[in-house]
Image (tube, grey):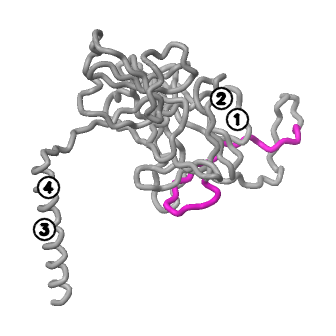
Amino acid sequence: MKNSTLIKGLLAACLAFCANFSVSAQEEGETPAETTVIYQMVDQVTSGQSYVMGIMTDDGWYCAQPPFGWGNPIYGRLMCQGKFELNDDMQVLPIGEYQLTPFTITKDDKGYLLQSGDGSYLAVEKPQNTGGDDKKDEKGDGKDDGKDPVLELRFILDNQFSEDYYWDIVYSDDLGGFTLKSKAADATLGIYGEMMTSEDENGQITVIYNYRIVAYQTLPDDMVGPIYLFEGMEVPTGIADVNNDVNAAKVVYNLNGMVVGNTTDGLKPGVYIVKQGKSVKKVVVD
């Protein structure tokens, strides 16, 4: 009975607080603004923001989904099944049934941490010591080259923090995107893709594309590719659909909110906010 009375008291207090807050908001004429999250391609990472991790393939753009499995931690592959397109402002437009799966990226003096929607940490398992029992024959001469085989490492999704889960995330001008490297596993992320076909009884050919992000200590040349990051940004609902007012003055801000001019011409490479009339968008200056 005491617990029941306590719960009722707390509930009444919460309702009273909400009522007072609601009245205050109405008295001041404040109405919560409806916002939409858009994902914009960027060339730098802001700690605490959410990002879609994307790859560009011959079949279009795909985003990574966290590894799925039972138990904790979860081990598996980082598959890329959610397909999307980019508009002229380099913003993500999802396609089909798959949802975008963002990761929150935070940074401290030890590196970057990547967390899925439920807060679990994304990492790469440490490579196992093969003991040199299985050697490679890279030259094709039938002789061991004395090197351990290059193995694709599994990804980890763990809700328990570990010092082994830090990453290096660096933008590469040469690649035009980011390189991600697991600190503990000393493994770099790359792109694996394959095209598979199947034929039904009527001779109809179906083409299936299979892409994933892979982690290797020695990344094979054919898997080297940029990882693109798209930062989530809240904007008033419908703002992405508003056309620019060509007669309105243009104001350009940096990501710190400082006005840097009325044009992006001559600005150093980076990401800027451009406001023109009722239109607000991010612009990447190369």
Q: Quadrant of the N terminus?
A: bottom left
The amino acid pointed to by label 4 is Ser
Q: Which residue is mark 1?
A: 219
The magenta stretch spans which residues?
Answer: 144-165
The amino acid pointed to by label 3 is Ala
Magenta highlight on residue 162: yes
From mark 1 to mark 4, how far is it between C-alphas? Answer: 58 Å
Cβ atoms under marks 2 and 4 closer than 8 Å? no
Question: Of the residues under marks 2 and 4, which one precedes in the sequence?
Answer: 4
x and y, in percent, of residue 181 in the image: 65, 42
Q: Which residue is mark 3?
A: 16
Q: Which residue is mark 4?
A: 24
Magenta highlight on residue 149: yes
Seen in the picture, residue 273 relative to 67 is either above or below; the reply is: above
Label 2 Cα crowd, 10 Å radius (few <14 / some 14-19 / many 20+):
some
Cβ atoms under marks 1 and 4 closer than 8 Å? no
From mark 2 to mark 4, how far is it between C-alphas? Answer: 56 Å
Residue 226 picture quarter = top right
Q: Secondary structure at mark 1?
A: loop
The amino acid pointed to by label 2 is Val
Question: Of the residues under marks 4 and 3, which one precedes in the sequence?
Answer: 3
* Residue 286 visible: yes
Task: Give the label, 3 or 2, closer to the camera.
Answer: 3
x and y, in percent, of residue 238 in the image: 23, 28
From mark 3 to mark 1, how far is it between C-alphas? Answer: 59 Å
